Amino acid sequence: MFTKRDTQPTFEAADGVERAEVGLVARVAGRELDAFEALYRIYHPRLARFLERVTRRPGLVEEVLNDTMLVVWNRAATYNGHSKVSTWIFAIAYRKALKALHRLDDSVPDDDSALRESPDPGPEELLGHRELHRVLLHAMDALSPQHRAVVDLTYFHGIGYREIARIVDCPVDTVKTRMFHARRRLKTLLAGRVEGWL
Amino acid sequence: MNGGRVVPLNPDAHAEVQVLLPWYVTGRLEADEHAQVESHLAACPRCQAEVEAERRLQAAHRGIASPGDVERSLAALRTRMAASQPATPAPAARAPRAWHWSGVPGWLQGALALQFAVIVGLAGWLMATPDSDYRVLGSGAAPGNVVVKFHAGAAEQDIRRALRASGARLVDGPTSTDAYLLSVPAGQEAAAIVRLRAEPQVLLAESLGGEGPR
């Protein structure tokens, strides 16, 4: 499925992390449970965030995340090292998320899920940030799961468009187009709802 | 930023740079693309403003916390994995590859059983109809090498999109199990199956020649 590795000169420092993750996957392929749990703990925050953003259904996140990691556990031996570990795992998670949404035959988010999932503000936390996050999450709801995936992989996970194309299994131009339209939509929505935005 | 250089604005270059700006802001462009954006930015106030907006948008995204509790989720997964362990046979009594089923959840075993039944059923159906027209459609007709099954609610346009995306051609079907036989050019089965499986309306996609992805 994957034939070419991204070359990201600005992220060369991450090579050590990548090597460590490749080593963990090799041990998972050998059915080493402690290696699997280490990989699980590394990926849980990123996958939870990604799956919540794509599905907009907090109730689905744990199930889909565990479905994803079960595939990692059972198919680690098929990982061939031609892609980054993160690309392989996010691609599994993306497919699982879309399948789960399809099973529900509904991609409408839970009511007020954005507010429930937002961090509680500390006493000194700026309410402006909280309001911005709330508006941003609701603006994201106006996008399709496919567009939300590209936005989240780009802005939050800092992944390049070529690697995103492998994760969502579509041409790089499609990734660029999805991102272009998504950000234009987000900016329009935010400009109408957040004072001083743009 | 521009060092006094004036770069002629080209509408195509402007559009090319605009689509790259999110990854310019996150530092994920290749060196040549990064240079292309920098060069354009030096002469384009609109894109300079766009970069500032991108930075704010990205910062707002990164400020949203990740949901969930890793230990609670991991405990739930351990429970699922333990529940899916086969209850009975002693290791010595198992088939040589039976260990593959350990850790496979019940739903997946069911799905694999369904998949196997569809493949076997389709193979039997094909063998039972040796004179079927699809085998002699003409010299250009390729035999079917991929079996696919769609969700019950799949619309015609869903099926058409899945076939086009995967480069597959419908050879025959539906079978009695509502599966379809597809023809994919030799050597492209694995890629086609990956694309088919990515389609939300595809229930299963398998190679009949054993060359698809697992």
Image (tube, coloured by chain):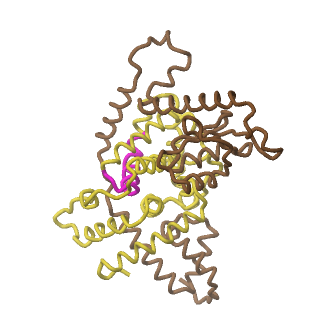
Chain colours: A yellow, B brown
Q: Where on the picture, by quarter, is residue B9?
A: bottom right
Q: With A47 as the anchor, is A28 left or right in this view?
A: right
Give x and y (percent) for residue B6.
Answer: 62, 89
Secondary structure mainly formed by the magenta segment: helix
Query: Where residue A34 sits in the image (x, y, percent)?
Result: 41, 32
Q: What residue sits 52% from the left and 32% below the top?
A: A29
Above or below: residue A128 compared with residue A167: below
Is residue A185 depicted above or below A116 in this figure? Answer: below
> Residue A8's image quarter?
bottom right
Magenta stretch: includes residue A47: yes
Residue at the location (64% across, 38% down)? Answer: B212
> Residue B30, image x and y in percent?
60, 65
The single residue placed furthest to the left in the displayed view is: A123
Q: Which is nearer the eye, B39 or A159?
A: A159
Q: Nearer the viewer, residue B8 or A100?
A: A100
Residue A120 relative to residue B185: left or right: left
Q: Is B18 in front, or is A64? A: A64
Q: Which of the image's four quarters has the C terminus of chain B? A: top right
Which stretch appears magenta?
A39-58
Relative image position of residue B135 (x, y in whole percent) = 76, 38
